[in-house]
Image (spheres, coloured by chain):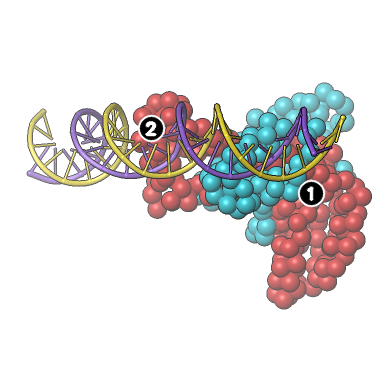
Chain colours: A red, B cyan, C yellow, D purple
Amino acid sequence: MEQIDDIDLQLLNILHDNSKYTVKELAKMVNLSPSPVFERIKRLENNGYIKKYIALLDAEKLNRGFIVFCNIKLKQHDRNIGNQFVSDIMKIEEVVECYNISGDYDFLMKVSAKDMKHYQDFVFNKLGSVESIGSTQSTFVMSEIKNLYG
Amino acid sequence: MEQIDDIDLQLLNILHDNSKYTVKELAKMVNLSPSPVFERIKRLENNGYIKKYIALLDAEKLNRGFIVFCNIKLKQHDRNIGNQFVSDIMKIEEVVECYNISGDYDFLMKVSAKDMKHYQDFVFNKLGSVESIGSTQSTFVMSEIKNLYG
DNA sequence: TTCTAAATTAGAATAAAATTCTTTAAATAC
DNA sequence: GTATTTAAAGAATTTTATTCTAATTTAGAA
């Protein structure tokens, strides 16, 4: 696999924070002309260093500002139960992230809801109908301190 | 504050997943001409529904594919200790997210490292020099199941 | 060191997209 | 019903992305 240099890394860091700079602006920042900057970015995209470009939305304005980390234990630990859980979880829009983890629980999910009422509804009606779940434990976010993706 | 309609919501959902569509492409998707789509997006930006545009990078390729959720208890719960903790944490690059949470611990951090060795070094040398920390508990991510920002 | 070849850059030229502007249509209030 | 406001369409313009060619730099071999 291709190796990246310091200028590539600079470009990645800049674009990771703001992908709306023009190549001309980026060129000035890294002391190059637009052409090589353009080519470097295309190469970083093609080689998979840049996966995609997205817009970050305001969760509060979209009624999704209530964040909960929800730990999950499965009923049993066979492959079918696990696959069923993953398949079910993928369809639930309130679940914005999900990880298979070490420790007392099997999965950690980040859940995004409007408020406590909405979260309660989510736990009862959505998680409640996922058969593979044995038990859950909710940790509520009181405030967001740092988020490089927020 | 302005109210958004169904087409705005469609645009937000599309851009949240891929912000590289052209206005012309977006126009076709929502059955409008480019001009109103352009104006709607500008309005959504100006009204704060869209916070920013970013590039998503490949953590594995950038030697940051080892993810750990790290729970933190502070030594004491006064404002000075809390502010000092927040200030310290903001400077540590391995900490990509941090939340003030309910429950047994005070904070939950998402940490991004190259591997276990790097994480160990992070815990000893970086967290180890944050005076406000009383205790920590690490939960290792074995695999990422779902991530709307990944 | 000097020559050669490969890779990288700069700058101009072109193509495509964003942005603006004017006209038209639709919705709402009166 | 008409007047007024709002939103949309389509054309015109500006800006940006993208391509291309020539010049420069870099790395390696003689």
The part of the image, by quadrant, that contains residue D1 is: top right
In the rendered image, the residue lying farthest to the top is B80
**Image mark for residue A112:** 1
The part of the image, by quadrant, that contains residue B78 is: top right
User: Label 2 is found on which chain of the structure?
Assistant: A
Q: Name the residue located 35 percent from the left edge and 35 percent from the top edge.
A: A35
Q: Nearer the viewer, residue A24 or B102?
A: A24
Find out whether the residues at labels 1 and 2 contact each other: C-beta distance under 8 Å. Answer: no
Q: Amino acid at mark 2?
A: Pro
Image spot of residue C1 (x, y percent): 11, 28
B120 is higher (above) or lower (below) than A103? above
The part of the image, by quadrant, that contains residue A127 is: bottom right
**Image mark for residue A93:** none
For the question of whether residue A138 can be seen, the reply is yes
Q: Nearer the viewer, residue A19 or D14?
A: D14
Q: Could you tell whether A58 is left or right of A141 in the image?
A: left
Query: Residue at label 2?
Result: A34
Q: CA distance from mark 1 to mark 2?
A: 40 Å
Q: Nearer the viewer, residue B83 or B13?
A: B13
Badge 2 marks a residue whose secondary structure is helix
Q: Could you tell whether B80 is left or right of B96 in the image?
A: right
Badge 1 marks a residue whose secondary structure is strand
C5 is higher (above) or lower (below) than D4? below
Q: Amino acid at mark 1?
A: Ser
Image spot of residue B60 (x, y percent): 54, 51
